[in-house]
């Protein structure tokens, strides 16, 4: 599990000093403390042989509690103790072994973590386990004059040098407020979402857990009447130029596909991103757009979103990771969307939030409404869902965007399912909205000059620029390719055959933000930075027995859902991962320029790579291929592809070019 790393001034403060005597307190409290210290000594002497062995640097804290708890006389609440190792992993501790103390049972009584406010005043509540100790101050009021509208969440947002940071947006998932000149915030929350979070301001970074999850949020007490203070400390950093790694659909589940072995592979995602970071020359951050886990296998393979989180520290992921929730990151026993996301929220954090880096404002949305018909405790449901953003998020989104002052700066919306998708329209290549309520998002970002959507889910690459909405979507293919199966099927090339449904290599998108300028390129895992396309000699492709048996695909006739996906002698097919309107493609045969047509069709590499029978894993149509016809089967052609940002990728293709799963 993952919980906030909280500065001492913020809450969850752990003291390792034994509470034996306290100076300058009234005689009665001193007497109580003497008795407590005697109890501690007695327990220690009688149970020395049974003292539990704890890992080095283990820590103990109250979950979801700040420095001070506010209660009224007669109130009752429960405290939950958590013991964690140095990596933040929860250590199971028997409740009976935790010892509880109060400095004044006339103010607050405590038994097995259950608190009852019995009189006005202040008391210290302490819990001990072995050598570990944590405490919280409780202030009890008579409640007669309590204002039901009084703020119950307060705190400070400060820089590491102690200065308050003004203008930081703070939210409980519903309301949004900003910090004052001293970095102070205050709001009245119904605590519906269970956390308070900040929209990390430009020029700062939040501390990360050992799993590289930035701690921009704090977990709240479930009791609305509890007054809490949660502070945030941020580190200044130059973000005038930065890079963003956008990866999606890891689908780690400990399945027969050897997904874990491939995810951890020494030449896989972690190593590849480390190389990208090493060459960046600027800060690098990451966003993962959902489906890190696979709900169907949470219980079947005993591998949930909590186990995925451990992979980040186990394998040394090199950057802070902002996460998005996918449909497969829900509890498959639950039919309620909010309940289904409980483990995700506990392990990863809020399902929607915002942050700022450089000039850009980023908004993360959960556009999966999990339905899971038929699910119940001990029984996996149908795992069905709707692709939409619920009303609570939309209301929060409006409030969050209203706080953004510079509407000319980049606005980036990150979510799992796609906003748009390519399709065949009136015999030609076009696109349409892909999710229910797409215009709920489109209408709310109007007024911003430069809007991007980064999404996953599809396991293909799609780039759609819609001038009417002003939105440019970069839908990124999967790190898992075809759910890791192609790497398992072709052991002759190790795990190096990781292919997505559209023929793209399994990989991630690398965005560069330089002021208001934004550029991007797709990075295949284990492939050079300039590996932007794969070119096929269709003469050789059509000789392959799998291709020959794939009719009606790869024949001389256009398929029902295809455009120009028919092939003849001497055709050359080029699959460009990042292709969209604005790219230029020039193919020359011995100095003579060839004319090409855009194809909506299926990629030959994926067709021979995935040899399984599962319907959703079959080769899909894509719209980023082009077809050219040479004059000879043995001529050499030169391919030059230039992207939106003026970068040219060149390949000299000597023909005949062999066709196999090992080709590039």
Image: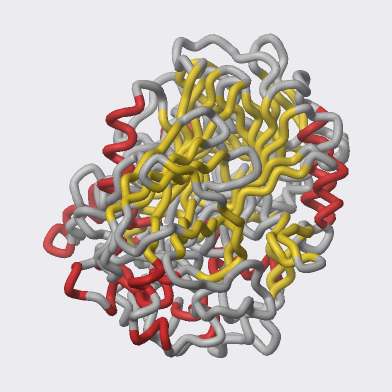
Res 81 quadrant in image: bottom left
Left or right: 590 in relation to 3: left
Q: Which color mode does the image show? A: secondary structure
Res 197 quadrant in image: top right
Residue pictured at 52% horizontal, 71% vertical: 602
Residue 106, image x, y percentages? 60, 44
Residue pictured at 56% horizontal, 56% vertical: 624
Residue 338, image x, y percentages? 69, 65
Depth check, front residue: 657 or 129: 657
Answer whether residue 577 is visible to the viewer in this image.
Answer: yes
Residue 79, image x, y percentages? 54, 54
Residue 263, image x, y percentages? 31, 61
Placement of 388 over or under 587, stated as above or below: below
Left or right: 170 in relation to 618: right
Instruction: Point out the image quarter for the C terminus.
Output: bottom left
Placement of 240 over or under 519, stated as above or below: above
Left or right: 92 in relation to 234: left
Left or right: 37 in relation to 159: left
């Amino acid at each position: 599990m993952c919980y906030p790393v909280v500065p001492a001034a913020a809450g969850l403060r752990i003291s390792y000093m034994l509470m034996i005597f306290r100076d300058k307190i009234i005689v009665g409290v001193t007497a109580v403390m003497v008795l407590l210290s005697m109890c501690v000594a007695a327990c220690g002497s009688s149970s020395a042989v049974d003292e539990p062995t704890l890992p080095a640097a283990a820590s103990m804290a109250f979950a979801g509690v700040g420095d001070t708890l506010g209660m009224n006389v007669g109130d009752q609440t429960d405290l939950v103790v958590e013991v964690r190792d140095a990596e933040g992993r929860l250590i199971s501790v028997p409740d009976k072994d935790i010892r509880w103390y109060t400095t004044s049972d006339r103010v607050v009584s405590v038994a097995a973590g259950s608190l009852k406010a019995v009189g006005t005043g202040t008391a210290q509540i302490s819990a001990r386990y072995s050598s570990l100790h944590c405490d919280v101050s409780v202030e009890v009021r008579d409640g007669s004059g309590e204002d039901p509208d009084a703020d119950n969440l307060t705190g400070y947002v400060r820089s590491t040098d102690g200065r308050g940071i003004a203008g930081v947006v703070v939210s409980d998932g519903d309301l949004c407020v900003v910090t004052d000149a001293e970095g102070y915030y205050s709001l009245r929350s119904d605590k519906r979402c269970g956390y308070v979070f900040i929209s990390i301001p430009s020029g700062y970074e939040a501390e990360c857990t050992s799993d590289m999850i930035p701690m921009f949020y704090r977990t709240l007490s479930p009791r609305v009447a509890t007054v809490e203070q949660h502070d945030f400390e941020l580190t200044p950093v130059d973000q005038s130029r930065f890079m963003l790694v956008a990866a999606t659909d890891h689908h780690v589940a400990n399945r027969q596909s050897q997904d874990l072995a491939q995810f951890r592979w020494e030449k896989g995602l972690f190593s590849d991103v480390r190389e990208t970071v090493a060459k960046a020359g600027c800060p690098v951050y990451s966003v993962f757009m959902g489906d890190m886990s696979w709900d169907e296998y949470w219980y079947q393979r005993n591998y949930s979103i909590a186990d995925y989180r451990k992979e980040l520290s186990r394998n040394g992921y090199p950057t802070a990771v902002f996460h998005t929730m996918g449909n497969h990151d829900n509890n498959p026993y639950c039919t309620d969307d909010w309940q289904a996301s409980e483990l995700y929220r506990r392990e990863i954090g809020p399902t929607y939030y915002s942050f700022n880096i450089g000039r850009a404002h980023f908004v993360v949305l959960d556009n999966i409404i999990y339905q899971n018909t038929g699910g119940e405790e001990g029984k996996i449901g149908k795992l069905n869902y709707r692709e939409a953003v619920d009303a609570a998020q939309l209301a929060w989104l409006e409030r969050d965007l209203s706080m953004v002052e510079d509407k000319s700066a980049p606005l980036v919306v990150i979510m799992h399912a796609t906003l748009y998708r390519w399709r065949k329209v009136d015999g030609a290549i076009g696109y349409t909205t892909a999710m229910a309520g797409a215009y709920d998002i489109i209408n709310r970002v109007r007024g911003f000059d430069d809007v991007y959507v980064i999404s996953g889910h599809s396991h293909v690459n799609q780039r759609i620029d819609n001038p009417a909405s002003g939105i440019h979507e970069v839908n990124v293919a999967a790190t898992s390719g075809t759910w890791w199966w192609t790497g398992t099927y072709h052991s002759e090339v190790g795990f190096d055959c990781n292919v997505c449904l559209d023929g793209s290599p399994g990989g991630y998108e690398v965005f560069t933000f330089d002021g208001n300028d934004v550029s991007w390129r797709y990075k295949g895992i284990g492939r050079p930075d300039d590996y932007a396309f794969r070119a096929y000699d269709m003469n050789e492709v059509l000789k392959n027995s799998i291709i020959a048996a794939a009719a009606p695909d790869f024949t001389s006739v256009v398929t029902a859902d295809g455009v120009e996906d028919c092939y003849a002698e001497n055709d050359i097919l080029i699959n460009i991962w990042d292709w969209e309107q604005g790219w230029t493609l020039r193919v020359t045969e011995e100095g003579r320029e060839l004319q090409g047509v855009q194809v909506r069709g299926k990629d030959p590499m994926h067709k021979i790579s995935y040899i399984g029978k599962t319907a959703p894993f079959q080769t899909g149509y894509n719209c980023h291929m082009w077809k050219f016809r040479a004059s000879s089967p043995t001529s050499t052609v030169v391919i030059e592809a230039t992207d939106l940002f003026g970068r040219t990728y060149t390949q000299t293709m000597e023909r005949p070019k062999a066709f196999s799963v090992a080709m590039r």
